[in-house]
Image (cartoon, rainbow, N blue to C red):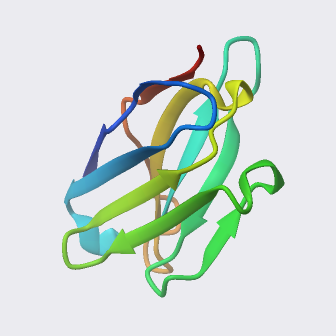
Amino acid sequence: QVQLVESGGGLVQPGGSLRLSCAASGSTWRINSMGWYRQAPGKQRELVAQITTGLTTDYADSVKGRFTISRDNAKNTVYLQMNSLLPGDTAVYLCNARGNAFHPRDDYWGQGTQVTVST
C-alpha cells in the first residue's frame, strides 16, 4: 500500500500563488504516475496535472501556463506550483498515485487540501 499526505493549501487572493506538496510513503516502488485532481462543490472531480516517473507531464487546458507540476523521485514527492490563481481554481485538491506496469490496478488518493482563491 501507498500513503499520500498533502500540504500547502490555504486562502490566497486572485493573482496570487500557492505551492502544494504530496509525499508518498509505503510501497512507493509500486507507483508510476503521480498527480493532482481537484473537486469544487457541485462539480465533478477533474485532473489538474500529472507526472510520470520519467517526468512526462500532462495538464488540464484550464491551468496550462499557470500551474507547474514537478517531482522529486528520491523523496517520492510531487509538487504543484500554482501561479496567477483565479477564483475558479477554488477547490479541494487531491493527490493521486497510479500503479506502474506491474501494478496497473493500484490507485491511491490523499485526503485532500483546500485551496480558496478569494478577496
Q: Nearer the viewer, residue 9 or 35?
A: 9
Farthest residue toward the right?
61
Farthest residue toward the bottom?
54
Q: Could you tell me which residue is drawn at 55 percent across and 63 percent down? A: 68
Q: Nearer the viewer, residue 98 or 88?
A: 88
Q: Nearer the viewer, residue 29 or 76?
A: 76
The answer to whether 80 appears left or right of 61 in the picture is left
Q: How many marks?
A: 0
Q: Could you tell me residue 102's position as x and y percent?
A: 44, 79
Q: Tell me the quarter of the image containing the C terminus.
A: top right
Q: Could you tell me residue 100's position as x and y percent?
A: 46, 75
* Residue 33 in view: no
Q: Is residue 83 above or below residue 44?
A: below
Q: Could you tell me residue 75's position as x and y percent?
A: 19, 70
Q: Could you tell me which residue is drawn at 69 percent across and 24 percent down? A: 87
- Displayed quadrant of residue 71: bottom left
The answer to whether 20 appears left or right of 14 in the picture is left
Q: Could you tell me residue 57's position as x and y percent?
A: 61, 74
Q: Is residue 34 above or below residue 45?
A: below
